[in-house]
Amino acid sequence: ISLDTEIASFAFEKIEFRINTNLVTELSTPQYIWTTNEDFQQFSTTQMTSTIAGGIINMSISGNYPNLIYDTSFNVDNFDRFKIVLKNETDSDKFWFAWYKDGVKHQRRIRPGINETSFNTYIIDLSVDADWNGTIDSFNVEVANLSSLGGTAEIDYMELMLKVGIEEHSITTNIEGSGVVSPSGGTVFTGNEVTFNTYPNAGWEFQGWTGDIVSTENPLTITVNSDLNIN
């Protein structure tokens, strides 16, 4: 390292050399379907006790406003409805899908039957709310248990539904030669913009992209509308 400076005195806190694989990222979409034991274990609860088994979360209601909480922020611009497969064994038909954005609560009502003996599917339209956009802080499924009726509710499946025309696409990259490309691949939604960079190893030069994309640009920015296999 050669350094030329007019500063009289200074110190480095850290000097780090990284191999080029440290430059590589992978594309991913946020989780938007919850249906397995592992999926439901990502949720926390308040004013209820819950058990998870067989891909079903069983919620035993205790307090007045029990919540099932998904405390993860993500962008919701690709989603416009919420789907839940629910068996409501309580006397309350006041369930809510609630989300927090910039610390402010918003909600849409779910209207299940009461004392249900089987699972039923409910879908609520989120697009009618002007605040359903951008990045949300978290979302909840809530029960209005104002009369302390208690009881249980079971959830088999939850999904934030993609807008019409939006799909999840897979991107695969293949290297011919020696070096790395970032992002290396992964999944994105229709209309997402992705920028690829190549980092050839010493003695190699970048020549171009082939396969589903043909270009000599580096970096290369594309808008994704299908699955892609890129060399």
Image: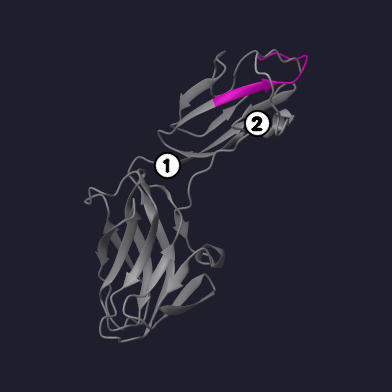
208 versus 191 height, above or below: above
Point 25% across, 70% down: residue: 111
Q: Helix, strand or loop at disc 2?
A: helix
Name above or below for residue 150 compared with residue 46: below
Residue shown at the point (50%, 66%) measured from the top left: 40
Front-lying residue, 61 or 160: 61
Pointer 2 residue:
23
Q: Secondary structure at mark 1?
A: loop
Residue 139 sits inside the magenta stretch: no
Query: In the shown orientation, is residue 84 left or right of residue 201?
Result: left
Residue range in magenta is 196-206
Of 17 and 115, the residue lying toward us: 17
Q: Which mark is residue 167?
A: 1
Quadrant housing the N terminus: top right
Q: Amino acid at mark 1?
A: Glu
Query: What residue sits 59% from the left and 19% below the top?
Result: 210
Residue toward you, 16 or 5:
5
Quarter holding the C terminus? Answer: top right
Q: Position of 77 compared to 33: left or right?
A: left
Disc 2/disc 1 C-alpha distance (Å): 28 Å
- x, y (%) of residue 55? 52, 70
Mark identifier at residue 136: none
31 left or right, relative to 121: right
Q: Quadrant of residue 14?
A: top right
